[in-house]
Image (spheres, helix red, strand yellow):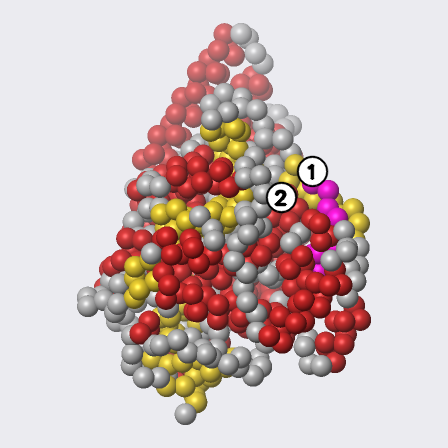
Amino acid sequence: MKIALVGNPNVGKSTVFNALTGSNQQVGNWAGKTVERKSGIIQRANQTIELIDLPGTYSLTAYSQEEIITREYILRENPDVVMAMIDASNIERNLYLVLQILELAPRVVIGLNMLDLAQSSGITINTAELALALNVPVVEIVAAKGKGIEEFLTQAIRVGTLPQDPLPCKVPYPEELERKVQTMEGLLADNIWATRYPLRWLSLKRLERDPEIGQEWKINVSKPQQSKGKEQCCDLGDGASYELEETTVLPGEDLLQQYEAEGWSKDHFEMAFADAKYQYISHILPKFRTYLNPTKPTWTDSIDAWVLSPIWGYPIMFAILGLVFWGSFVASAPLGGAISQGMAWAAEVIVRVLQWAHAPDFVQSLIRDGIFAGVGAVLAFVPQIAIFFAFFSLMQDSGYLARASFLGDRFMQLMGLHGKSFFSLVSGFGCNVPGIMATRTLEDPKDRLITMLINPLIPCVPRLGVMSAVVAAFFPGSRGTVIMLSLLILSMFLVMVSALFMRRVVRQKERSAFVMELPLYHMPTLRNVLLPTWQKTYSFLKRAWTFILVASIVVWVLSSYPQGVPMKATWAGEMGGWLGFIGEPLGFDWRIMVAIVFGFAAKETTLSTLGILYGVAADASQSIAQAMTGAMTPLNAYTFLVVYMLYIPCLASVITTYKESGSLGWTSFGVAYNLILSFIMGWIVFHGGLALGFH
Amino acid sequence: MSCLLKDIRTGERVCIESIEGGGAIRRRMMDMGIVPGVELEVVRRAPFGGPLQVRLKGYYLAMRLGECAKIVVTGTRQTAIDKIPHLEYPLASR
């Protein structure tokens, strides 16, 4: 049996889905889209049920990815029953979606969530009357506490196994509109498509000139993988792909043109249908809803009075962001350190075994200095990412993220971006990987792509660490602060300019509309925070580890061969020499070019690479930086910093961009853009500096 | 007396008369419940000319001033939302 879970965003669908499927979830992507697809298998009384968590959506038109996916699933995969979750405090808007679902899929069960929250806003819902008004079973749930969820599923199974389709309520349209609908119904009644879909729905869509109807699709669903051991989650393949087999043009073209001549365009029909639904909802609303203006403000109002106040809002936001950053990137350092040490220890053990087995030297070096060093460096920052994801889930579920977007929108507007990009960009300061992944909250795919592509321009903590060490060595004292600030301002400026440039490249014609819901605050459940954190971290590692392994081996090979020769003659050195022609206009010698190339794999190793190249045997980045003062002028150092800050994100973030955008083309474009931009800026800085008399 | 939503002061309750323009923005507003005939209350404005927060039918929406400039509203009496007797709102002219 197939069951689809549908509802507005923020209504608590994930809570119910997680409660029912536990860790038996499969997370992947919808074919051709960059939206997560979640499905799970449940067993109930000898029935195997496949439950699909469709993305939160406000409507079933065909304009946003979420809407398209929801519609496509219901149309093409024919679930047996739809579980529609609605929010009691928001019931009119939720019912707008439910009415659209009812037109399309007659077997529906409604789950009424957040009754307690509604109560505190002064709203009471009479469940029995609601069920009567819509002729659909309604189950009361308190998803956060797990109440009613099982009953919800039971009702859904019952409706799914009914011998005949129930007859839910029909939205009465105004007379003129109703006549047009019935005329169209008459034309379509004999068509084969009328046997597959409700006739009324078919004619409504035909009047709207919906592109989806009349298309015959074949579904290729990848089988859920049999569990290999305990972890069945996080399969990364595409859940289902669709193939267009044929398209039939439905009758009614003449009628549509006649209507258009009368002034009823497809837009007009769309508006009229939407309007009629809302009217119907306000008509039946008093039957089951009573509303009394509450005497005291709700929790949400009280909290928002601080969080969104013009005076306190921004300081509170900085404090919260500061806490998130501190927790993710500073407090997690011991964990990262422990992993590094663990990796080094494991490497030693293996090397000793190899020695005992008389394995050749180069194998030992490969294992210890190549594989374990490279992979270990990346694994060491997994705790950072995991903790950050946990904070992110916390903020998203609680409702705070929407407030941050509200406050940050003005600045995003300057760059042509959506308020939700704010958090993604700010996260980039900590690490670009979660920053890029945070773009999932953006609904418009073009907004998402632009934000992803400019994210690497924001210097992340590892980069900032290297930069501050170099700055401290070359520009001691307060000059150092000024230099550091100038670098940050430069990167901010380039982010803004790039955002505007990217809009042209991505060809975003309409500025994205900022109409965003500010959900009521609520306490996220532990499961809702930990489960996505685990899933995201696991999926990131799974995709990344092969690339990182290969990159580490390549770096090791390049710097170790040919053996026994001085640094300059190794393949890495040769490469640096060859690339020197690029570095020359910027005053870079071959060593810096080599460090830049290797910095691709992991930023924090840049300094140690430089140390090796300059023949400095020291551990601390400060001492390496000190040693470099003898080999470079301050202007050289500044140029290097500019290029280093911008030139390319680390390998991990390139992989993440590829995974989130789904497009090799755009990922390569982003990488090329960063490279070219950084070298142009470096050139400007170097020659500008010379011209101004610095050295 | 009609004016634009973006000019309404904080704390005022208004009723939507019509929405100008079309396209994706209008559809999005429609999906979110912003249709002619609804009552909403302006809760606050973000500083520096940022978005407006409105309350309608028990939930909150945020919209940029640019979008608010497309919404034509009229003032309304201060009554609790559900106590208005059943009214027929005619289909607003598009």
Secondary structure at numbered mark 2: loop
Q: How many marks?
A: 2
Q: Residue shown at 72%/76% (left/top)? A: A259
Which is nearer the eye, B10 or B64? B10
Secondary structure at numbered mark 1: strand
- Asked whether residue A215 is drawn in magenta, I would say yes
CA–CA distance in space, label 2 to label 1: 14 Å
Image side of residue A644 versus residue A253, left or right: left
> Looking at the picture, do discs 2 and 1 lie on one chain?
yes
Pick whichever of labels 2 and 1 is earlier in the sequence.
2
Q: Position of residue A33 (x, y in %)?
A: 62, 50
Q: Residue shown at 33%/71% (left/top)? A: B82
Q: Which residues are magenta?
A: A209-219
Which is nearer the eye, A330 or A475? A330
Q: Position of residue A564 (x, y in %)?
A: 60, 25
Identify the image quadrant of residue A223: top right
- Categorize mark 1 by other alpha carbons within 10 Å: few (<14), some (14-19), many (20+): few
Q: Residue furthest bottom?
A: B1
